[in-house]
Structure formats: structure tokens, C-alpha cells
Image (cartoon, rainbow, N blue to C red):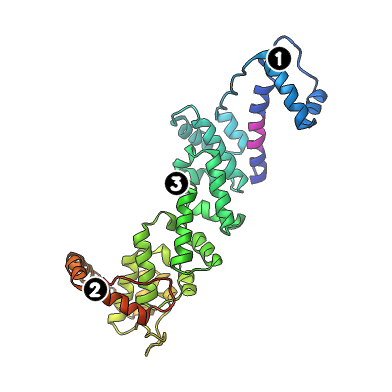
Amino acid sequence: MGTRVAARQVLRWTGLNATSSVFSPLHFGTRPLQPLCTGCRLICSSSSHNALRSTQHNHELGPQPRAPVPELSLRSLVDMGFTDSQAEQLHEATSKLRGGSAAQHALSTLTALFVLGLNPSSVLKLLEKCPELYTVKESQLQQRMGNMRKLGLVEGSLQRVVSHYPQILTVPVKTVKSVVVFLREKCQFTVQQVADILRDSPAIVLENMGQLEYKFQYVYFRMGVKQAEIVKSRLFRFTLDEVRCRHCFLERRGLYQTPDKKGQTVILNPKLDSILSVDQDTFLAHVANAPAEEYEVFRRLLAREWQEEEQQHGSIEADSGGDDDEEEVEETGGKGGYSKRRKK
């Protein structure tokens, strides 16, 4: 069943549950149900007239019970477009949820994902990757998706991001905004570049901010790479250790040089994209021109070197006082949004 049809099935099924609770004979006592045409007139009447009738009706019948929370039965899941086996998987997953509103949250999640344009198979895979989505409230889902749209992720991009990294819908809006502020103010990325980063590297919203900051500083100051190339290379998909290891290997082989304060080098440095966005074999064969055995030995020695530096970092930082680092940034940093950086 197509995505649009599946979405309509969800909304229709939800509407039927709501309608059955509103027009139940329990609400009308012994009086007969209104004809369909009368019901339509009631729905289409003015808001003030509806409010008056609702007030009079409540006075007559007293406080009304809340509508029952709809149950995600196997039949209802099949009606949404899932196959029998997919419906069984979903029903088993939702039956394990605890709490009175668990089924309602699960229904809201399914509805939101269908409306987003995902088909039943994609929805099932997405929920298998991130079962936490079953318990996210509808209001939170809407706020988070609305916030991402404001950041420039239009429907096609938003669909791809959610499919690739569904955990982004579990992250509070406040957390996402703090990452965006960091990228805009500290790293000096443009609005479009921030949108591209979120689209290509959505896991950045859960990355440690200290590590994120040092990664950017390392590439910007140490490697001399500017914002446009950073975005193109999808830097934030990679760990700091991966970036430093490949860069240091090239540097010690004389294949990479830190640009001077004018941004110039004696040799032609390889692009950051060609360093990071390839597998190890391609990197060694076409960029580093080195055998795999040599690189593995270098990685082990470099890891030991970093460990020793970390052990001595506290005493070195206390002796230096940080003044030399600030002076170095004045010479090599340029306009990068930082007033200081740490060397390691």
C-alpha cells in the first residue's frame, strides 16, 4: 500500500476511534442518535454556537469521561498498511510498553512518520533502530520536526535525516539549538552550511561539545582548512582520533603542511575530503602512498604518544599558563570565531 494511502489509513483509523467515543449512546442517554445530515450541520456550525451547545449539554449530563485510549491491535496495524508479519512485530513491541498513555504515544509516532512520507517498511526499520520513539509525546514530535524545518531541513532532507538517524527525534529542541548556536557563533558557519551539517551528520546533536569544539579547532587551526571545505568533507561524521591519525601520518611523511599565516604552503596539500571520505585502503593507496603495515605500526605508536601526552598534559598546562597558545592563534588563527585554543 502506498505511503499516502497508509497515512490516510492511520488518520481514518484514528478518526473512527475518536468518532465512536463522541457519538456513543452513553453520551446521549435514551435519546436516539442524530441523523447524519444533522451531525454534519453540527460540525460545520460556528464556533460560538458549538461552545453554547457544548456548555448546555455538559450541564445536562454532568462531567464526561475521557475518551478511551485507542488500542494498537493487529487488525488496526494491517489497516495502516503493514503486512501481517510486520503488524505482529509492531504489536509485540507496543505491547511491552508500560503506562496508560503508551499506546497513544505509539499511535502518534506512527502517524507522524507516515505523514512525513515514510512507507510501512521504512517505519518498521526506523522503529527497530530507535524503539525510544514509541514513547515520545505527539507535541514533542511536532516541536522537534518543526524546529528542524526552521533550520532548513525541508521535507526531502528531513525524511532522509530521520530515516538515517531516527534518534534525532528523541533530542530536545533546546539541545539542538545549542549545537546550532555553537556552529554559527563559534565556528562561523553560515545558515545553509549548518543545515548541510545537520543533514549529513545528524549525530552531531548528541556529540560531546568539548570534543566537538576541539575537533573543529584542530582542523581549522592545525590543518588550515576553512568552513566550506569542512562542510564538504562531512568532518563531523568522523572521530577526532581518526582525523588526527590520518593527518599526522601524512604530515610525518612530508605530504601535508600546515599553512602559514597567509594561508600558503610549500607543497600542495590533499583536500580534507580525500583524506577522510574514503576507506583506509583507498587512503593509503591514493593519498598516503604507503603500505598498510606501515600505517598500522604508526597508529599504535601514535596512540602510545597521545597517551603519554595526556598523562603529562596537566603539568605542562600549569607551567605554560596558556599565554603562548593565545599568541599563536593571533598569528595563525585568522578570523575563526575563537580567541584561544589549546595545543595537545
Q: Which residue is mark 2?
A: 298
Labels 3 and 2: the sequence-earlier one: 3
Q: Position of residue 318 (x, y in %)?
A: 19, 68
Is 172 included in the stretch rendered in magenta? no
The residue indicated by pointer 3 is 129
| Magenta segment boundaries in residue numbering | 9-15
Q: Quadrant of residue 230?
A: bottom left
Residue, disc 1: 28
How crowded pointer 1 is (Cα within 10 Å; few <14, some 14-19, many 20+) is rated as some
Do the CB atoms of the residues marked 3 and 1 lie less than 8 Å apart?
A: no
Expressed as whole percent of the image width and height from the top left, the position of residue 204 reads 43, 58
C-alpha gap between disc 3 and disc 2: 36 Å
At 60% from the left edge and 56% from the top edge, which residue is drawn?
A: 156
Residue at image position (44%, 62%) is 182
- Name the quadrant of the C terminus: bottom left
Q: Tell me: residue 289, above or below residue 118.
A: below
Q: What secondary structure is found at the residue carrying circle 3?
A: helix
Side (left or right) of 178 relative to 117: left
- Mark 1 vs mark 2: in front: 1
Q: Which residue type does callout 2 highlight?
A: Phe
